[in-house]
Amino acid sequence: MFSVTCVAPVNIALIKYWGKRNEDLILPINDSVSMTLRTDELCAKTTITASESFYSNKMWLNGEEVPFEENTRILRCLNEVHRLAICAGSQKIPLSWKIHVKSFNNFPTAAGLASSAAGYACLVYSLACLYGIPVNDQLTTVARQGSGSACRSLYGGFVQWHRGNLDSGCDSVAKQVVSSNFWPNMHLIILVVNDQRKNTGSTLGMQRSVQTSQLIQHRADKVVPERVNQLKTAIHKHDFDTFAKITMKDSNQFHAIAMDTYPPCIYMNETSHSIVSFVHDFNELMGSSLIAYTFDAGPNACLYVLEENIPKIIYAINKAFPNDEESADYLRGIPLSNLDIKLKTKDNSFREKMELLKIQQKNKLKYIIHTKVGEGPRLLRANAR
Ligand code: DP6
């Protein structure tokens, strides 16, 4: 009996993946770029055990058994890892042995935060550890076939998923742009919005967009290639202002395409839109872009910020989005107390400016998660019995 336990991170796209040219192989119509988050706050943790005595493959997600053999995406990942093991000549464990997979997310699924990306990245990374195959660009083509965005979670820092040109998908790989220590003060504040409404999932939503949106092809052909280059340059230069503008414009364009889909996919709600207005008002008052928002296929806001600006930003969020809850449960993740919000905000001219912010009704935000750029998946334990 062999078993491995691994963790894998969540990633949040700055340039969004939206639309496939091949549904089976999960080949995208455009490149995308994301930032990987550290695993302390958000991660998937997976244990895979392989044994000669297991009769069938089984899987549990957050303690509940889920179908394995009926899930084509999971089966494809397993078969692809087997193929890579054969190619690499790895004989660590017999491929005929059945496996049991137990996976947990350390964050509430209700938050709707890229759980499939972390989950599939963790599955594929754990399988690679189990069968003794290397983690490289080839492995990202396997994670991609679990869930497109999962391929970007196999690396830390900033990551680009190249759409590729081949029909086989061999060149549709994720590659690291820079590692997590390149821009270590890049943090993320997630505003979890008080909304449990069910939306059209990403897979179905993007399928509908490809079929019905007239804007999507223009985005893929003209807008994304230019934006990816500009964003990578901004990252390399630590140019937050440009980084912020590109990120916000790309989030807006993705939601414009979702709206141009017929019937439309509506992911952002009223609170999401008030967060957008808040960010623009705040940036305007501060004289430069200190916050960059991005929204995935749901109402929660991901705010990219630099560590040194966090005290002011949190002050402004608390001012514009007042909340009854002041407990640690409201502000989760990296503690903010040591960042000294009070000291930094003694600045009178800053406080005066903040008086100009529009104040929302109380309790529009459910809770806030503070995290930062992080590293790729890692092996926690490997046992042989
Ligand atoms: C809006 O990777 O969840 O988060 O490939 O069908 O599993 P499938 O879709 P998925 O889509 C993610 C879409 C997005 C943007 C992004 O992460 O790039």
Image (spheres, rainbow, N blue to C red):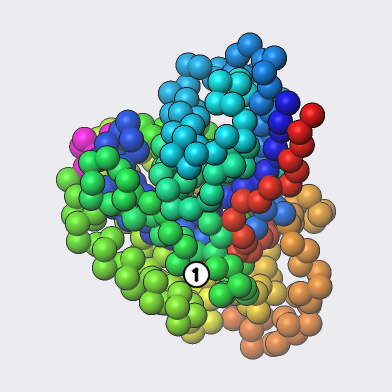
Q: Position of residue 122 (x, y in %)?
A: 59, 41
Residue 218 appears in which quarter of the rendering? bottom left
SS assignment for the magenta stretch, majority: helix
Residue 87 lies left or right of residue 109; in this view the side is left
Residue 383 seen in this snapshot: yes
Farthest residue, direction top: 55
Whether 41 is among the magenta residues is no
Residue 58 appears in which quarter of the rendering? top right
Residue 334 lies left or right of residue 145; in this view the side is right
Q: Residue at x 82, y 53 (%)?
A: 327
Q: Residue at x 39, y 71 (%)?
A: 232
Q: Amino acid at mark 1?
A: Val
Residues shaded magenta: 208-213
Q: Residue at x 67, y 68 (%)?
A: 314
Q: Which residue is mark 1?
A: 178
Residue 300 lies left or right of residue 210; in this view the side is right
